[in-house]
Amino acid sequence: MIIPAAGLGTRVGSPAAKELLQHPYYSMSFMEKALERVDRAGASALVISRDDKKVLNDWLMEREVPHIQIKKTPEWVQTIWASRDYWGKKNLLLLPDTEFSPEHVMSEIFSDLDTYQVSFGVFSVENLSLWGGVKREGEDIYIAEKLANAESGLAWGLIGFQGESGESFWKNYLIAQSSKNWVKITQTVSMHRLEKFEDLTRG
């Protein structure tokens, strides 16, 4: 599982490592909870950190958590793109500062990646200008990242993707991010409904 942790944490006051802040629902940090989920799923973790996040990097090294260090990127999508040399055959993007249910969706997404190239865990929102979105129109699938115009629809909370088709998918996601519009993707896609999804550092 890929855990992005290279952000600046500006929404929570730019701490040395927002991922090590106390989780509001559990007696552990955001990162500890994310790693616990990875372990329960029987998967391996790859944390993407930034080379100047010494507090987090030291924490990861002390616990022998697999991680890479990259240069500062403009947004989280570029962070994922920078990790492409480390993608496996099947990958799942797990945002550490989020809460979702049911957790067994992670296993279902991994299972789907035997057949589908991309698998989403999705939930309904009223304003896709605040979220990453995905929609199906007939046989076509479109993705968006914080649409320029507000509309309701499905946002994603989890993304699974096959490594061999990942570059094509994330190139389209970069286009969606810069255009603030819907972008058609060519990958085969499955979707799973999340009962709950929260961005815990959105504010």
Image: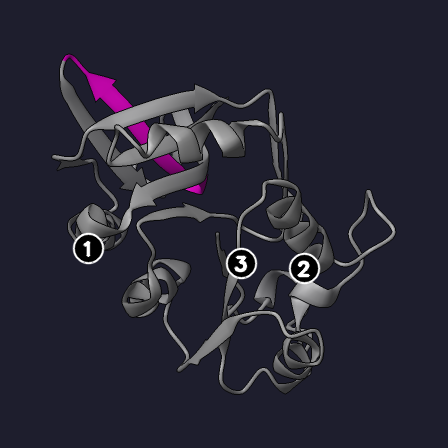
SS at badge 3: loop
Label whose residue precedes the other's in the sequence (3 or 1): 3
Residue denoted by label 1: 167
Which quadrant of the structure image shows residue 189?
Answer: top left
What is the three-letter code of the residue carrying label 2? Met
Q: Residue at x 34, y 56 (%)?
A: 88
Q: Nearer the viewer, residue 183 or 169?
A: 169
Label whose residue precedes the other's in the sequence (2 or 3): 2
Q: Residue at x 51, y 72 (%)?
A: 67
Whether the residues at callouts 2 and 3 have beta carbons within 8 Å, the answer is: no
Mark 3 vs mark 1, foreground winner is 3
- Compared across the picture, whether 51 is left or right of 97 comes to left
Q: Nearer the viewer, residue 33 or 124?
A: 33
SS at badge 2: helix
- Residue at the far right in the pictured view: 27
- Dominant secondary structure (helix, strand or loop) of the stretch shown in magenta: strand
* Residue 121 at x, y percent in the picture: 45, 29
What is the three-letter code of the residue carrying label 1? Glu
**Other residues around mark 3 within 10 Å, as few (<14) / some (14–19) / many (≥20):** many
Disc on res. 31: 2
SS at badge 1: helix
Q: Residue at x 70, y 77 (%)?
A: 59
* Residue 7 at x, y percent in the picture: 51, 68
Disc on res. 45: 3
Label whose residue precedes the other's in the sequence (1 or 2): 2
Residues shaded magenta: 129-138
Mark 2 vs mark 3, foreground winner is 3
**Other residues around mark 1 within 10 Å, as few (<14) / some (14–19) / many (≥20):** some
- The residues bearing labels 3 and 1 have C-alpha atoms spaced at a distance of 20 Å
